[in-house]
Image (spheres, rainbow, N blue to C red):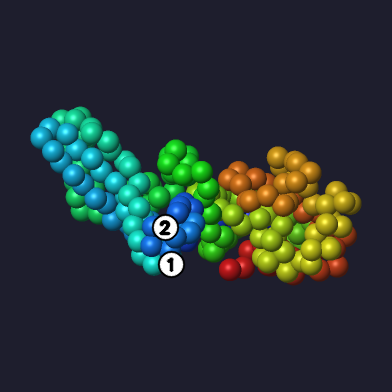
Amino acid sequence: MDSILRVLWTVVAQDTPQPLLRCSRCGRERPFRSSGRFRLNAQGRRIDAWLIYKCMACDDTWNRPLLERRPLAGVAPALLDALQRNDAALAQSVGFDTAGLRRHCAAIEVPDDDALHKTVVSHPAGTVHRLEIRLAVPHPTALRLDRLLVRELGLSRARLQALCADKRLVLAPDSPRALRRAARDGACIVLDLSRESDAAALAAAACSA
């Protein structure tokens, strides 16, 4: 009989990555947050477009380049319409494009105020002897894997480390520093519950919101 509880944890970022830029008003480096609004400038047959960011301390602005002197005829009508409407989905997509953002700034802060959604993939009818947690992380997060597990399973850091040392908690892909790194899309955590006195409580915690 299958005794494996399989769950999917989806980590949903609540805010987009924030570039660290020198603010002209503050006179120092500050994090800037996406405003969700675009700025357009059309001259002749060419167009420029930017996503507007604001200093989190004083609201000074920085324009992140999206289109630079692009021939207007080469811009898809749907994209142009979305830019003109300040389409929220487009702003979010651009805001989470960390690789593109790094082309314009050297340092980026990734917020760790994520929401977590838990989905039970399969639940055994009897006693749970093994817990498998698979992570879905659609956007970058700064939330460390060890902090996520401690918070959601109610484990102490010492116990988490002991479980890893005894190979009762295994990570895939495995890495000596995986627990101390940000949670990654596709990661899998396997916890052997066969010798844990609170196995039922751990299984319940893995499923509960």
Is residue 157 visible to the viewer in this orientation of the structure? Answer: yes
- Point out residue 77 in the picture as x, y percentages from the top left corner: 18, 38
Q: Nearer the viewer, mark 1 or mark 2?
A: 2
Residue lying farthest to the left in this orientation: 44
The front one of 38 and 55 is 55
In space, the residues marked 1 and 2 are separated at their CA atoms by 9 Å
Question: Mark 2 and mark 1 in contact (Cβ < 8 Å)?
Answer: yes
Q: Amino acid at mark 1?
A: Ala
* Residue labelled with disc 2: 23
Q: Residue at x 72, y 52 (%)?
A: 180
Q: Position of residue 135 (x, y in %)?
A: 61, 50
Residue placed most toward the observer, 39 or 81:
39
Q: In front: 169, or 66?
A: 66
Circle 2 crowding by C-alpha within 10 Å: few under 14, some 14–19, many from 20: many
Vertical position of residue 11 compared to residue 46: above or below:
below
| Amino acid type shown at disc 2 | Cys
Picture coordinates of residue 26 (x, y %)?
Answer: 43, 63
Compared to 173, does 16 lie above or below? below
Horizontally, residue 66 falls left or right of residue 141, namely left
The residue at which mark 1 appears reads as 57
Q: Going by the image, does 177 lie left or right of 182?
A: right
Q: Residue at x 72, y 64 (%)?
A: 150
Report the disc number at residue 87.
Answer: none
- Measuring 19% from the left and 38% from the top, which residue is drawn there? 47
Q: Quadrant of the C terminus?
A: bottom right
- Other-residue count near label 1 (Cα within 10 Å), few / some / many at <14 / 14–19 / ≥20: few
Residue in front for this viewpoint, 35 or 3: 35
Name the residue: 68% across, 54% down: 145
